[in-house]
Image (cartoon, grey):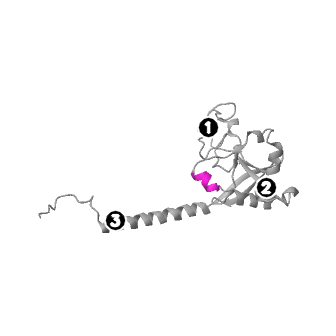
């Protein structure tokens, strides 16, 4: 049989080329995993407000890979000396509410940041709090600043979920698309 050396054979199976491609994929996968791990280890300052009917604002430093459950335990330990009712509470008895959404304990801060998750009234991926820039700037422009997350005891929420602001809170569902949000009086 005659073979034409000018014919493109790139589409044919080639063990060496496939092995090189597999090695490249594995190297890139390893690099990606290492990059993600480094990002999860980065420190993040989270401003929160312990909410017992009135706000008590504090902040704490954690890593981005920290789960909401571990964050709540760190906060409980941090503020239990100021709030005696938290001394006997567990982190399972606490809720983290961010932008009117109750964030389940299994999510990490990295999950919210990487997905650029949005709440009812602002982004779920900003954890630092700034002064209200609408006092000096145009209120029609969407801001990426956010409100401090609230930490409440689960039984406080159960007793008060029919009263504002708890009446607005709902459990975070990442499958719900929350496009643009309104800021102050319906301006966007």
Question: Which residue lies under the disc numbered 1?
Answer: 142
Query: Residue 93 — which label?
Result: 2
Secondary structure type for disc 1: loop
Question: Which residues are drawn in magenta?
Answer: 107-114
Q: Earlier in the sequence, mark 1 or mark 3?
A: 3
- Is 91 left or right of 116, judged from the image as shown? right
Secondary structure type for disc 2: helix
Q: Is residue 112 magenta?
A: yes
Q: Earlier in the sequence, mark 2 or mark 3?
A: 3
Query: Residue 155 — which label?
Result: none
**Quarter holding the N terminus?**
bottom left
User: Eyeballing the image, is 161 above or below 103?
Assistant: above
Secondary structure type for disc 3: helix
Rate crowding at label 2 as few (under 14), some (14 to 19) or many (20 or more) other CA atoms within 10 Å. Answer: some
The residue positioned 29% from the left and 65% from the top of the image is 14
Locate residue 94, reporting x and y percent: 77, 54
Question: Which residue lies under the disc numbered 3?
Answer: 18
Which residue reaches farthest right?
A: 84
Rate crowding at label 1 as few (under 14), some (14 to 19) or many (20 or more) other CA atoms within 10 Å. Answer: some
The residue positioned 53% from the left and 62% from the top of the image is 35
């Amino acid at each position: 049989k005659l073979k034409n050396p000018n014919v493109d054979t790139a589409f044919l199976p080639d063990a060496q080329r496939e092995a090189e491609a597999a090695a490249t994929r594995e190297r890139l996968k390893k690099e990606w995993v290492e990059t993600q791990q480094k990002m999860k280890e980065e420190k993040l300052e989270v401003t929160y407000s312990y909410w017992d009917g009135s706000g008590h604002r504090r902040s704490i430093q954690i890593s981005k890979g920290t789960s909401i459950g571990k964050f709540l335990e760190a906060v409980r330990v941090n503020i239990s000396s100021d709030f005696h009712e938290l001394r006997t509470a567990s982190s399972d008895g606490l809720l983290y509410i961010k932008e009117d959404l109750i964030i389940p304990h299994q999510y990490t801060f990295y999950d919210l940041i990487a997905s650029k998750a949005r709440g009812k009234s602002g982004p779920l991926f900003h954890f630092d709090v700034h002064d209200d820039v609408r006092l000096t700037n145009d209120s029609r422009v969407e801001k990426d600043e956010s409100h401090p997350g609230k930490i409440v005891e689960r039984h406080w929420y159960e007793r008060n979920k029919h009263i504002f602001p708890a009446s607005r809170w709902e459990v975070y569902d990442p499958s719900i698309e929350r496009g643009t949000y309104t800021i102050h009086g319906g301006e966007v």
